[in-house]
Image (cartoon, rainbow, N blue to C red):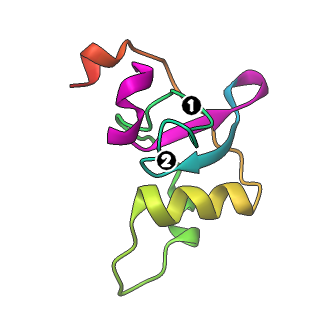
């Protein structure tokens, strides 16, 4: 992603071996900890439903992903593509 576009996307911060450390939802350029967009296709194991409340709306990006990171559930990023291919 281009650094001047970081405010348009949620970003993901990764560490060793692509393990996700945190997420930021549309940070300002000055506050962005990464320039990796959090967008794409997500593949989960069936156990993911253990982390999602029943009978209520629950957002993947703003609620599920931060919850998984907070609980130290292994979460890895997949292949990176140039931002132009994500539009």
Q: Quadrant of the N terminus?
A: top left
Horizontal placement of 12 versus 83: left or right? right
Mark 2 burial class by Cα count in 10 Å: few <14, some 14-19, many 20+? few
Find residue 77 and name its label.
Answer: 1
Give how far across and how far down residue 46 sits, in percent. 51, 56
The CA distance from mark 1 to mark 2 is 12 Å
Q: Residue visible at 36% across and 87% down?
A: 55
**Residue topped by disc 2:** 44
Find residue 28 and name its label.
Answer: none
Task: Check the image and name the residue furthest to the bottom.
Answer: 55
Magenta run includes residue 78: no
In the image, the segment drawn in magenta is 1-17
**Disc 1 element:** loop
Q: Is residue 37 above or below residue 22?
A: above
Give how far across and how far down residue 15 sits, in percent. 75, 30
Q: Residue visible at 53% across and 49% down?
A: 24
Q: Residue visible at 57% across and 70% down?
A: 51
Magenta run includes residue 3: yes
Horizontal placement of 31 versus 55: left or right? right
Q: Nearer the viewer, mark 1 or mark 2?
A: 1
Q: Quadrant of the C terminus?
A: top left
């Amino acid at each position: 992603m281009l650094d001047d576009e970081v405010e348009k996307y949620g970003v993901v911060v990764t560490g060793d071996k692509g393990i996700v450390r945190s997420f930021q939802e549309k940070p300002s350029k000055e506050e962005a900890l990464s320039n990796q967009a959090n967008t794409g296709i997500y593949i989960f194991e069936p156990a993911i439903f253990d982390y999602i409340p029943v009978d209520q709306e629950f957002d993947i990006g703003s609620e599920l992903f931060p919850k998984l990171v907070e609980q130290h559930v292994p979460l890895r990023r997949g292949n990176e593509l140039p931002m132009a291919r994500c539009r």
